[in-house]
């Protein structure tokens, strides 16, 4: 979000988008709850904004005008990509239709820019490389309602706003935007969004593209085909759901569950390929093995005083549904920073991770990739939302805890709590306390499942 209107509670988190096309300013409402108004009329589609127009976003009045020239501002135009077209194969540059005053990316050695999303583009006209120092770019056919970075106007099979490419740290994603003829990744039709590796072939109309991100730390762009590197401690990790720097989160009715004997390295790709855009991203900032929870102090002194009563309350729950409701409604009494809570159970028969109970009424988010990792390596995690510079989609939850429920080697479910306060962070003692309760709940859940099985017989 480039313009933060946080004090105005009637403004949605991602409320509207304004952009410059030629010498005209356009505005589009992004599905905000209160809407965007221009001269008193509610905005229902993208429209040109005249200099004297009155724009209202919630209770905030704005005036939108095109920026001053670069010369008058004393610098290059802002909000434009650092774009450079490379001619690695010696062919002349084709006309781009872009503003000649558009700034170029920093370059070294033979003039190749380093930092940004690199696109190897192959069309009927030949091959070239494009580099955008942006976190998000759009592919399509040039039109005034949307800024198109990769303009394929000569290809009639390309929709006006065909696809979106963005990066989260060193990973590139591609999403088809309900185009007419679709987007193919390695020959497979793309539904929603997925991660693309440098060697993956993305076909849009008659164009073939490969995407990779370079952070600019190397003297020359990387040409490696492997996935982004991770610390040595992670490379030695043999868990099918590998340790990542950050994890995507989603909001779904249920999530696919991979049984321990059916987990392969390709499972992570299988999860990502079928996904729409994530709701946001989270980054682990602490972890604790189930076997170490007691050694970490098992929480604060106040928690330890409450523990005998918590044991009694868990014992009095009549079934697993009652256990789940007890947890989500009572966790804030002994973990005071827990503003939200969710109780997930593993449905082994259906192969799903299902939501048993949650508080408040809004459906919770989950990173099922991190959830699988927590189950697989018997570890609880604390996490925080990544920064705005890494992911433009923002969550209302800023910190959280994931604790696996496992008993006798059987994976039973997951406990999740979240804090919505700005700058929130859960401590190791918080994680240890939740893990102690998680182990008590795991025993109770396993007991009720056994009782239900006996009753069914």
Image (tube, helix red, strand yellow):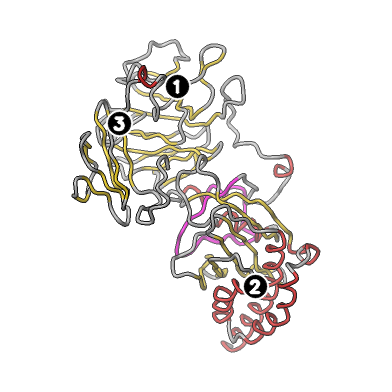
The residue to which callout 2 is attached is 334
Quadrant assignment, res 209 = top left
The residue to which callout 3 is attached is 20
Q: Secondary structure at mark 1?
A: strand
Residue 241 tag number: none
The first of marks 3 and 1 along the sequence is: 3
| Residue closest to the eye, 351 or 292 | 292
| Residue closest to the eye, 208 or 166 | 166
| Residue closest to the eye, 457 or 228 | 228
The residue to which callout 1 is attached is 129
Q: Is residue 443 above or below residue 388?
A: below
Q: Residue at x 46, y 13 (%)?
A: 89
* Mark 3 touches mark 1? (CB < 8 Å): no
Residue 348 in sight in this render:
no
Range covered by the magenta-colored residues: 246-270
Q: Position of residue 140 (x, y in %)?
A: 31, 33
Between circles 2 and 1, the one closer to the viewer is 2
| Residue closest to the eye, 15 or 439 | 15
Q: How many marks?
A: 3
Quarter of the picture holding the N terminus = top left
Quarter of the picture holding the C terminus = bottom right
Quadrant assignment, res 334 = bottom right
The first of marks 2 and 1 along the sequence is: 1
Q: Position of residue 377 (x, y in %)?
A: 70, 57
Q: CA distance from mark 2 to mark 1?
A: 56 Å
Q: Residue at x 37, y 42 (%)?
A: 176
Q: Is residue 345 above or below residue 112?
A: below
Q: Residue at x 38, y 56 (%)?
A: 9
Q: Residue at x 62, y 44 (%)?
A: 245
Q: Secondary structure at mark 2?
A: helix
């Amino acid at each position: 979000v480039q313009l933060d209107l946080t004090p105005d509670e009637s403004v949605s988190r991602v409320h509207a988008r304004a952009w410059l096309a030629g010498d005209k300013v356009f505005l589009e409402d992004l599905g905000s709850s209160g809407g965007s108004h221009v001269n008193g009329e509610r905005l229902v589609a993208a429209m040109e904004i005249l200099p004297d127009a009155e724009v209202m976003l919630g209770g905030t009045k704005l005036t939108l005008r095109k920026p001053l020239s670069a010369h008058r501002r004393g610098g290059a135009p802002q909000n434009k990509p650092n774009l450079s077209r490379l001619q690695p194969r010696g062919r002349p540059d084709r006309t781009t239709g872009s503003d000649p005053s558009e700034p170029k990316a920093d370059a070294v050695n033979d003039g190749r820019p380093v930092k940004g999303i690199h696109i190897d583009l192959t069309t009927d006209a030949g091959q070239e490389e494009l580099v955008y120092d942006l976190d998000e770019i759009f592919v399509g056919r040039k039109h005034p309602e949307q800024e198109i970075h990769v303009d394929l106007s000569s290809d009639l099979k390309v929709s006006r706003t065909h696809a979106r490419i963005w990066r989260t740290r060193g990973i590139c994603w591609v999403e088809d935007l309900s185009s007419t003829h679709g987007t193919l990744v390695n020959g497979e039709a793309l539904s929603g969004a997925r991660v693309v590796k440098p060697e993956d072939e993305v076909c849009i109309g008659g164009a073939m593209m490969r995407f990779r991100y370079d952070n600019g730390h190397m003297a020359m762009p990387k040409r490696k085909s492997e996935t982004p590197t991770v610390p040595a401690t992670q490379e030695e990790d043999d868990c099918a759901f590998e340790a990542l720097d950050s994890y995507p989160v989603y909001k779904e009715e249920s999530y696919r569950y991979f049984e321990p004997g059916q987990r392969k390295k390709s499972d992570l790709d299988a999860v990502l390929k079928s996904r729409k855009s994530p709701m946001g991203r989270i980054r682990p900032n602490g972890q604790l093995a189930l076997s170490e929870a007691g050694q970490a102090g098992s929480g604060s002194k106040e928690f330890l005083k409450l523990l005998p009563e918590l044991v009694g309350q868990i014992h009095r729950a009549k079934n697993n549904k009652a256990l789940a409701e007890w947890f989500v409604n009572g966790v804030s009494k002994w973990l005071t920073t827990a503003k939200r809570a969710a109780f997930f159970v593993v449905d082994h028969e259906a192969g799903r991770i299902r939501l048993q109970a949650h508080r408040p009424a809004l459906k919770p988010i989950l990173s099922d990739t991190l959830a699988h990792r927590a189950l697989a390596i018997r570890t609880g995690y604390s996490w925080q939302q990544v920064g705005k510079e890494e992911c433009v989609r923002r969550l209302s939850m800023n910190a959280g805890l994931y604790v696996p429920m496992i008993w006798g080697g059987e994976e039973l479910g997951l406990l999740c709590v979240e804090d919505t306060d700005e700058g929130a962070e859960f401590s190791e003692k918080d994680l240890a306390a939740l893990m102690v309760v998680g182990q008590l709940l795991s025993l109770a859940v396993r007991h009720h499942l056994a009782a239900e099985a006996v009753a069914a017989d």
